[in-house]
Amino acid sequence: MRAGTLAAEAGGGRALTFVLFLVFIGITLGITFWARANTKGAVDFYAGGRSFSGAQNGTALAGDYMSAASFLGIAGIIALSGYDGFLYSIGFLVAWLLTLLLVELMRNAGRFTMADVLSYRVRHQAPVRTAAAVSTVTVSVFYLLAQMVGAGALVSLLLGIHAGETFMGMSADTARTLAIIGVGALMIVYVSFGGMKGTTWVQIVKAVLLIFGAAVLTLLVLARFGFNLSSMLGAAADSSGRGQAFLQPGLKYGREVPDTAQTLINKLDFISLALALVLGTAGLPHIVTRFFTVPDARAARTSVNWAIGLVGAFYLMTLALGFGAAALVGRAEIVAQDPAGNTAAPQLAQAVGEMVGGRIGGEIMLAFIAAVAFATILAVVSGLVLASSTSLAHDYFGHVLMLGRPRESQEVAVARFAAFLIGSLAIVLAVIAKNMNVAFLVALAFAMAAAANLPAITLSLFWRRFNARGVVWGIYGGLLSSLVLVFFSPVVSGKVDPVTGASLSLFPAGVDFHWFPMENPGLVSIPFGFLCAVVGTFLGRERADRERYDDLSVRSLTGAGSA
Amino acid sequence: MVWDSRPPQPRGGRGRARQGTGVRYAAMAHDERFLLLRSRFRRLAAAIVASFMGWYLLYVLLSAFARGFMAQPLFGNVNVALVMGVLQFVSTFSLAWCYASYARKTLDPLSAELRAEADQAPHPPGHAAVRPEPEARARAEDAAAERSPRPADPFTAHERGASVERPRDTERGWPGVRPDPGWLQ
């Protein structure tokens, strides 16, 4: 029998976990201060000197992309709800094809941010730059919030601090707050000192650790079942208590309920999520900023191909992690540790470690995977803070407030300070929200990126008639519609557990102002974002500048005159 | 050439409407080789988007509405849903590979040729005919600026041009001094 809690029995393991955390922090701080010494100006700070190779940048892209939500979250969803968690993996991967098609054009046409591409064709840059900065910061902060709240919960769970327990004299609640503040402080240091150079190397270290950790776990799990996928699936289905349904879609998304209308809504909701996942990636700010860290468009293409390979391999392994956890750890023990299933992967690590090396083996594997999860959280939040401070400094400060002529040193100083501001904002919000269920924010961030950024990017590159008002309307329309729809959706109010009556929403039970039936706004807000962009274009008095469009198409396709 | 290193946003937020400001490569948009490159890229991109989106949406719709089909076992405990899911991975890898190899073989040589030409030719074909006078003057100014010493403080050499003391080039709304490449490249 496996112990019900991760850390209660793992006294030595907790110390080992702690030591590994400290080792990772030490290494990354070393990288950061090396990067600080080698960051001279804006190109270094925003784009790492454009000196990364395709393989390096591709690994960093994968590191930026594979968040704790995908490592721990998907493994957890598969472990608890079976096949449906795999749908996430697929959406997250397929999205990269769209990114692959856009990356070279954006690399050629822009320099540091998405707004560089969007504002290229327009006569008055300020509104476009402002809109792009607003969208970048909003998407980043929501995504950041999800990661930081998760970080608080996870660090305390991984260190084995439970409600009612104390750790070095702290209650679980204090430990959560401290974990959030600690993660936040580290990410501010990484970004404001290390800039893109430091952050990229942190991502590379993290991506290698994560892929290595997942590969070790996958091998151990598959070896346990004699490398027979079918018998692993069978064991998972048996142990889940759901039988074959565990291996089929429908336990979590698009659930079939007696009410036909509700069933249809559930299914549309699932399609909405699937759309946001596949269309959001190419507009995620921390992915877009990374397009500019390579010397040219070919290297950008290579880096996305590397990312596809790494991300794809990783998401395939989530199958083994999730179903392995269901089979080897068991539903009851996962839920006892964390009802959302986020600790399924660390628990699986402990279980397979014990099979190989007894108790010590279990503790070592647990500590290692916990440290990998910690590295994942830290790296992803740093990428997000870097993307939004870059946009604030370069787009809003540099091009709107300073009319496009700040001193370089000024702009970089503002970027460092913006990292501090956004980081602090995220810490405060995450501490406030630390006990809320904010898992929906990741899907919301993808939906906003797809609804606000994707229309502006694609229409700027491909539609001759597109103009400034189209960009501005498209961005605000997509952003606001996503936000409003989510605010009036069941994730914010009105969703109760039919059995216990407890609230499953952000607001407590009893508060119910929801009128939008779906939890994911993408199905409505993505077409709405495109519609706003088109309508805005036709209503704008500004005529599209044909010559600028021609210039942009030559530059984006050939790379002539690229930075 | 001076304009090689020019950043993509050569225009200020002052809101002055300036026809053709900073446009350097527009003339090439009518070059036959460019049109060929563009149509090849667009056709390829459309084909890739149509195939992966169609295949992905098919998979999503089947997962939502054809659960009986997805539940059919194929071998052991492996069912249609799992195989379809893994095939999404396979198709993503193959499409990415197809795109990369087509781009390397067919698009890259063409775009490299056009890029070299655009970056070297002071007059992209037909360009001088559009605005001969101010362009020539601007180029002469740029060339003069390039010969003159750079500003001492690299930080003053911003993308907008280092020379606050120099008058803005009215034709392009862009100071005539070549910005410090360190800040640009």
Image (cartoon, coloured by chain):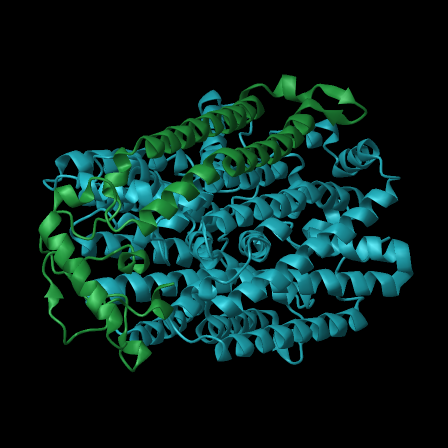
User: What is the drawing colour of chain A?
Assistant: cyan
- Residue at the image point whose x is 79% and y is 38% from the top: A239
Q: Is residue A141 visible?
A: yes
Q: Is residue A491 visible?
A: no
In the picture, residue B126 is in which quadrant? top left
> Is the C terminus of chain A in the top left, top right, bottom left or bottom right quadrant?
bottom left
Quadrant for residue A454, please give it: top left
Up/down of A131 relative to A153, above or below: above
Residue A277: give x, y in percent of width and height: 49, 40
From the viewer's perspective, tell me whether residue A64 is left or right of residue A516.
Answer: right
Residue closer to the observer: A122 or A323: A122
Above or below, A132 against A174 in this view is: above
Camera-side residue: A129 or A358?
A129
A488 vs A431: above or below: above
Quadrant of the rendered structure where residue A79 is? Answer: top right
Q: Residue at x 27, y 57 (%)?
A: B3
Measured as percent of width and height from the top left, residue A195 is found at: 46, 70
Image position of A100 (left or right of B124): right
- Relative image position of residue A57 (x, y in whole percent): 54, 56
Q: Position of residue A100 (x, y in %)?
A: 49, 41
Q: How many marks?
A: 0
Rendered view: B159 above or below A514: below
Chain B: colour as depicted: green
